């Protein structure tokens, strides 16, 4: 793709120190995010999706810390990209909100129950945009109306516990958009919502992207949501992106065994009634006991090389996407 990405993550590493050992929650992840496009980050629970999002914004909770890599943000004026990992905490405050915003996974846990939703939206507006209280309140009402909250002039004075799950998620999106960010990270935005509300939230994100040219990072474990929303995909397993590429290519011809296993586990209308859904054998290993070699090899039905059990596979280019699997080359000792 010739266009310059708004956000480039390169070889990102985030670790958590614990008495049992060091957890490599994010272990060399790389991807690009483009204006007006959605990058879907998909994988099972515990694969490092949410930690990747928090690493980008510099809000990894202790004892976690980013230990390596680059997070390059392209300035709005098209200048030289800046590395967010080299910014001071004070400078990062100017990035969170106006440049990159995050829709948290659990709105009820993310809002303060002691302040109205209007006050919580207005706080970021006044901090980053310098508006008066009256102007910030008017903008908060406009934002609630934009994301489809009914009677926004009344709802602005309500508390989070007075809203349904779907409305809280809409308010969370309004808060994220309050300072006109260029990149929106949506961390499991449809978790715990009914199917109808899920569809409404996804439609809202798509509409906002079309109107504003937002670059969206959509974190989910649902391959159906990825198929509907994403332009590009990063499939993560145990802290690593094992396959990245265009959604149409990955769904048409997945190249990594884990991606193939995820796609097989999706229910289809062609499945025979009263038959068990295909599942991925085994479970994600304990983070303190990471497998040697390819992290997926204990569950992989296609691990045929000795190197699968001894050395992590390098990233190789295959059919227009990047894949970490010895089935596509990169074997130790093999000719380039």
Image (cartoon, rainbow, N blue to C red):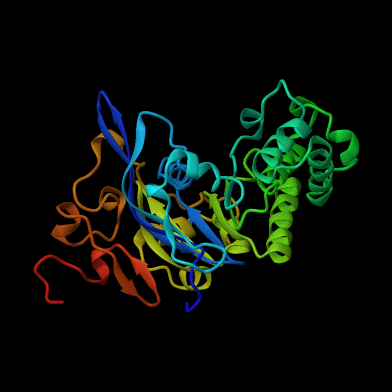
Spot occupied by residue 85 in the image (x, y as percentages of width and height) = 38, 48
| Rendered residue at 48%/53% (across/down) | 42
Q: Residue furthest left?
A: 333
Q: Quadrant of the C terminus?
A: bottom left
Vertical placement of 253 versus 199: above or below? below
Residue 170 shows in the view: yes
Q: Is residue 315 left or right of residue 9?
A: left
- Residue name at image x 74 percent, y 40 percent: 171
Give percent across and percent down for residue 266.
Answer: 54, 56
Image label count: 0
With 84 as the anchor, is 145 left or right in this view?
A: right
Quadrant of the rendered image containing residue 319: bottom left
Q: Residue at x 17, y 62 (%)?
A: 305
**Of residues 35 and 91, the one drawn nearer to the viewer in this rendering:** 91
Q: Is residue 256 above or below residue 171?
A: below
Task: Residue 260 in the image: state x and y as whole percent.
Answer: 42, 62
In the image, 96 versus 262, the foreground residue is 96
The answer to whether any part of residue 280 appears in the image is no
Left or right relative to 103: residue 298? left
In the rendered image, residue 15, in percent from the top left (x then y), is placed at 32, 38
Q: Nearer the viewer, residue 280 or 66?
A: 66
The front one of 107 and 288 is 107
Farthest top residue? 114
Vertical arrangement, residue 111 with respect to residue 187, above or below: above
Picture quadrant of residue 9: bottom left
């Amino acid at each position: 793709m010739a266009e310059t990405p708004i956000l480039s993550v390169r070889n990102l590493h985030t670790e958590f120190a614990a008495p049992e050992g060091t957890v490599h929650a994010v272990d060399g992840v790389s991807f690009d995010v483009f204006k007006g496009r959605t990058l879907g980050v998909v994988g099972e629970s515990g694969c490092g999706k949410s930690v990747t999002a928090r690493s980008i914004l510099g809000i990894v909770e202790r004892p976690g810390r980013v230990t390596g890599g680059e997070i390059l943000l392209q300035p709005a004026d098209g200048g030289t990209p800046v590395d967010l990992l080299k910014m001071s905490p004070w400078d990062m405050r100017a990035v969170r909100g106006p440049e990159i915003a995050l829709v948290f996974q659990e709105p009820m846990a993310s809002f303060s129950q002691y302040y109205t939703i209007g006050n919580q939206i207005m706080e970021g507006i006044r901090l980053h945009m310098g508006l008066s209280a009256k102007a910030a309140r008017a903008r908060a009402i406009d934002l609630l109306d934009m994301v489809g909250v009914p009677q926004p002039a009344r709802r602005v004075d309500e508390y989070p516990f007075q809203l349904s799950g779907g409305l809280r998620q809409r308010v969370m999106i309004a808060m994220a958009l309050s300072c006109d960010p260029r990149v929106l990270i949506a961390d499991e935005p449809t978790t715990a919502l009914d199917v109808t509300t899920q569809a409404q939230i996804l439609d809202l994100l798509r509409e906002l992207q079309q109107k504003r040219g937002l670059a969206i990072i959509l974190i989910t474990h649902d391959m159906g949501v990825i198929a509907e929303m994403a332009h590009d995909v990063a499939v993560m397993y145990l802290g690593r992106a094992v396959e990245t590429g265009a959604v149409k290519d990955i769904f048409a011809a997945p190249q990594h065994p884990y991606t193939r296993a995820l796609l097989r586990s999706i229910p289809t209308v062609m499945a025979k009634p009263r038959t068990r859904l295909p599942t991925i054998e085994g479970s994600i290993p304990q983070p303190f006991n990471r497998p040697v070699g390819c992290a997926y090899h204990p569950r992989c039905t296609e691990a045929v090389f000795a190197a699968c059990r001894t050395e992590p596979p390098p990233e190789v280019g295959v059919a227009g996407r990047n894949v970490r699997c010895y089935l596509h080359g990169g074997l130790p000792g093999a000719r380039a």
